[in-house]
Image (tube, rainbow, N blue to C red):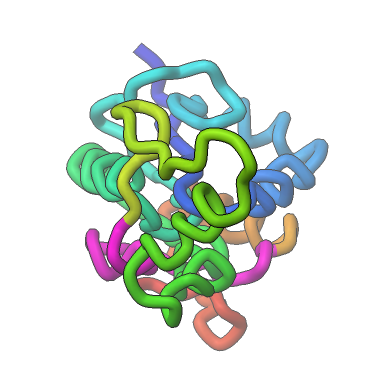
Amino acid sequence: MSDKARVATVWLGGCSGCHMSFLDMDEFLFDFAERADLVYSPIADVKDFPEDVDVTLVEGAIANEDNLELARIVRANTTTVVSFGDCAVSGNVTAMRNPLGDPENVLVPVYVDAVDRNPVVPSEEGIVPPLMPQVLPVHRVIDVDVYLPGCPPDADKIKRAVTALLDAEPLVERGTDIQFG
């Protein structure tokens, strides 16, 4: 059995820019791989979120029911949950639909009003997950331990946060964005 930390990354409602910044850590990824096993991520082909995860970086907001379900699974199986990027921290761009009210106010113009053939809002199970009435930052639906804002957070900030978490050191950058929940 490995004595490495078990780390996961999750992509909810967002653009994947935070994961791109994670990959921008370049050669630090080799150091990371020596110290941690990436047990779940959109950059790895793992279908089910595992148990006993030490740290999970959660990118994106809670925009649909699939996001909500995955967030709850993450919290139930993770020791330290990191709200990773501005969409996870505040809703950011993902929440721009909130002032429009009911999600149907977005779906009907896109899927019905703007099309020439087969104008229908997709509703078959497994095609488009039902949208939440409002897009929510992660901390509104699960407990978050660490906030790592930025759109996206730069690679150096991610490296500092990941290193501190792997070293089980306090994150001392509270004044520069990295914060405990």
Q: Quadrant of residue 180?
A: bottom left
Residue 54 shown left or right of residue 97 in the figure: left
97 relative to 32, above or below = below
Residue found 52% across the figure and 64% down from its top: 94
> What stretch of residues is rendered in magenta?
132-153
Count of labels in the image: 0
Of residues 65 and 164, the one drawn nearer to the viewer in this rendering: 65
85 relative to 163, above or below = below
* Residue closest to the far front: 116
Q: Position of residue 161 (x, y in %)?
A: 56, 59
Q: Position of residue 64 (x, y in %)?
A: 35, 50
166 relative to 77, above or below = below
Q: Position of residue 59 (x, y in %)?
A: 50, 52
Quadrant the C terminus occupies: bottom left
Quadrant the N terminus occupies: top left
* Residue closest to the far bottom: 175
- 128 magenta-colored: no
Of residues 17 and 7, the one drawn nearer to the viewer in this rendering: 17
**Res. 46 in view:** yes
- 139 magenta-colored: yes
Residue found 30% across the figure and 25% down from its top: 50
